[in-house]
Image (tube, helix red, strand yellow):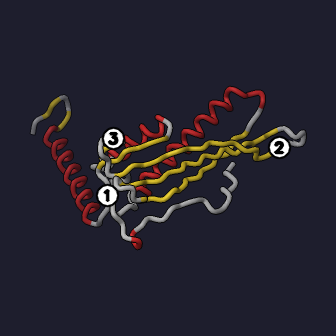
Amino acid sequence: MHNTKGVDVTRTAGMSRRSFLTLLGGAAALSACGFQLRGQQDYTFKRLAITGGVPQMVARLERMVEGGSDTVIVKSYEKPDATLNLSEAPGMRTLSLNAQGVVQEYELVYNLNYSLMGADGTLLIPPSAIALNRSMTYSDQYTLAKKSESTLLYNDMRNDAVDQLTRRLATVRSLYPAPSEQTSGIAPRAPLPVPPL
């Protein structure tokens, strides 16, 4: 046995080997049962163009699509297999007032509207929407802080919407779907629930 400054090198190497083999065995077992890391998608389209959307949203969507699949993001003139059309609509509503009629809470709402069109004009995902909301307390004393908080909440909703969108894009199974294979549009039919406090 080699001893270096009180550390048993042989024992440490044996533990490292054992830990590695345990990790490898666990990974093999997970892959055998069909486990797939979150974010790994197999999109039908391999070249996707994105139109509309704010740069921050488009950048996150590009990272998620290219980082989690073999699909690449291309410009609309580079012969994409599909084109994703995006538009967002943030908004704010009064949620509650105090006894003097001054706003105590706001409801921040965020809608991401999207559709997916194939290279030949086939509508792969009809116009759909992802609707999200958050609540935010408010006070005139902290106007700047509340403005920063609302920006953070809108960014959080935008990121959540992009995460949902990547999963919805994975529901497209064919670039030339038969009527029975067409992906249905999704639109919020009921008002958003009151956001949690």
Residue bearing mark 1? 44
Q: Residue furthest bottom?
A: 180
Q: Amino acid at mark 3?
A: Tyr
Sequence-wise, the earlier of marks 2 and 3 is 3
Q: Secondary structure at mark 2?
A: strand
Depth check, mark 2 against mark 3: the one in front is 3
Query: Distance from label 2 to label 3 (Cα)?
Result: 51 Å
Depth check, mark 1 against mark 3: the one in front is 3
Q: Amino acid at mark 1?
A: Thr
Which quadrant, please, contains the N terminus?
Answer: top left
| Mark 3 closeness class: few <14, some 14–19, many ≥20 residues within 10 Å | few
Which disc is residue 77 wearing? Answer: 3
- 147 horizontally vs 162: left or right: right
Q: Nearer the viewer, residue 118 or 23?
A: 118
Q: Nearer the viewer, residue 139 or 13?
A: 139
- Give the residue drawn at x 51%, y 56%: 127
Q: Secondary structure at mark 1?
A: loop
- What is the x, y in percent for residue 119? 34, 53
- 55 horizontally vs 188: left or right: left
| Mark 2 closeness class: few <14, some 14–19, many ≥20 residues within 10 Å | few
Query: Distance from label 1 to label 3 (Cα)?
Result: 20 Å
Q: Secondary structure at mark 3?
A: loop
Q: Amino acid at mark 2?
A: Leu
Which disc is residue 97 wearing? Answer: 2
C-beta proximity under 8 Å, tags 2 and 1 = no
- 141 horizontally vs 154: left or right: right
